[in-house]
Image (cartoon, rainbow, N blue to C red):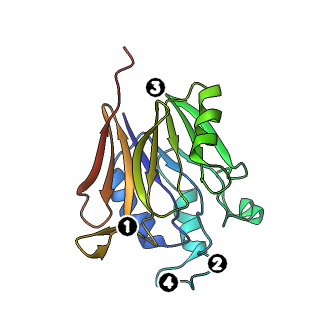
């Protein structure tokens, strides 16, 4: 099992392309929102290309699940062939039950309560552009950071990141190198 986890691409095609390289032949990709539009307080950066990213998302060779973020207007549903109308995505993949939400409208404790109602074991959020893997009330919370507008610093430099959920671990990896920067074991469900 391999699930790619991404958030806050904000219309940057090169960020998506590098993420796809890291995800390799993932079984599934989860996107926690802020897909196409740049952050409202930040001008577009080099590589900002909504039509280009739309084309890549629509032709993604792996199943793609998207939860709508605070920078994802409903009008984008006219462009994307993947539904991104709901602020939540809930899915079961093999033995994992996963709740995906952008993370802007609810506290992590509120999300954990909602996830508990669905017996989820993993919560995926984005929004902060800061990668994290935490245990929240017995649930694993992963925020993959941002591959396009990172706020995560490592060795004095901003590092774009994405996440991976694999058979026995969850990790955050650098977009440029694929190097793992945070890892967390997935408890056995046997």
Closer mark to the observer between disc 2 and disc 1: 1
Element assignment for label 2: loop
Assess disc 1: are there few (<14), some (14-19) or many (≥20) residues with their C-alpha within 10 Å of its C-alpha: some
Q: Nearer the viewer, residue 183 or 78?
A: 183
Element assignment for label 4: loop
**Pointers 3 and 2 in contact (CB under 8 A)?**
no
Q: Nearer the viewer, residue 129 or 36?
A: 129
Disc 3 to disc 2, C-alpha distance: 37 Å
How many marks on residues? 4
Horizontal and vertical percent for residue 75?
77, 65
Residue assigned mark 4: 45
Q: Residue at x 55, y 77 (%)?
A: 49
The answer to which quarter of the image holds residue 190 is top left
Disc 4 to disc 2, C-alpha distance: 12 Å
Q: Nearer the viewer, residue 132 or 82?
A: 132
Closer mark to the observer between disc 1 and disc 3: 1
Residue 94 - label: 3
Disc 1 to disc 4, C-alpha distance: 18 Å
Assess disc 4: are there few (<14), some (14-19) or many (≥20) residues with their C-alpha within 10 Å of its C-alpha: few
Disc 2 to disc 1, C-alpha distance: 19 Å
Name the image quarter holding the N terminus. top left
Residue assigned mark 1: 152
Horizontal and vertical percent for residue 10?
55, 70
Closer mark to the observer between disc 1 and disc 4: 1
Horizontal and vertical percent for residue 101?
61, 48
Up-down relation of residue 44 to residue 4 (above or below): below
In the image, taking residue 39 as reference, residue 129 lies left or right, namely left
Marks 3 and 4, the one that precedes in the sequence: 4
Marks 4 and 2, the one that precedes in the sequence: 2
Assess disc 2: are there few (<14), some (14-19) or many (≥20) residues with their C-alpha within 10 Å of its C-alpha: few
Assess disc 3: are there few (<14), some (14-19) or many (≥20) residues with their C-alpha within 10 Å of its C-alpha: few
């Amino acid at each position: 099992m391999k699930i790619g986890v991404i958030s806050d691409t904000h219309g940057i095609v090169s960020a998506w392309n590098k993420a796809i390289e890291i995800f390799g032949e993932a079984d599934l990709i989860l996107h926690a929102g802020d897909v196409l539009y740049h952050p409202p307080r930040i001008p577009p950066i080099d590589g900002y290309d909504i039509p280009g990213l739309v084309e890549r998302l629509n032709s993604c060779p792996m199943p793609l699940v998207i939860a709508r973020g605070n920078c994802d207007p409903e009008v984008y549903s006219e462009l994307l062939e993947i539904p991104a109308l709901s602020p939540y995505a809930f899915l079961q993949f093999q033995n994992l039950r996963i709740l995906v939400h952008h993370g802007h409208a609810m506290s992590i404790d509120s999300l954990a309560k909602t996830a508990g109602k669905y017996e989820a074991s993993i919560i995926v959020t984005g929004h902060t552009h800061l990668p994290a893997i935490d245990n929240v009330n017995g649930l694993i919370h992963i925020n993959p950071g941002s591959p396009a507008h990172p706020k995560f610093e490592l060795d004095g430099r901003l590092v774009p990141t994405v996440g991976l959920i694999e058979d026995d671990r969850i990790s955050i990896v650098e977009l440029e190198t694929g190097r793992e920067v945070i890892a967390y074991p997935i408890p056995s469900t046997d």
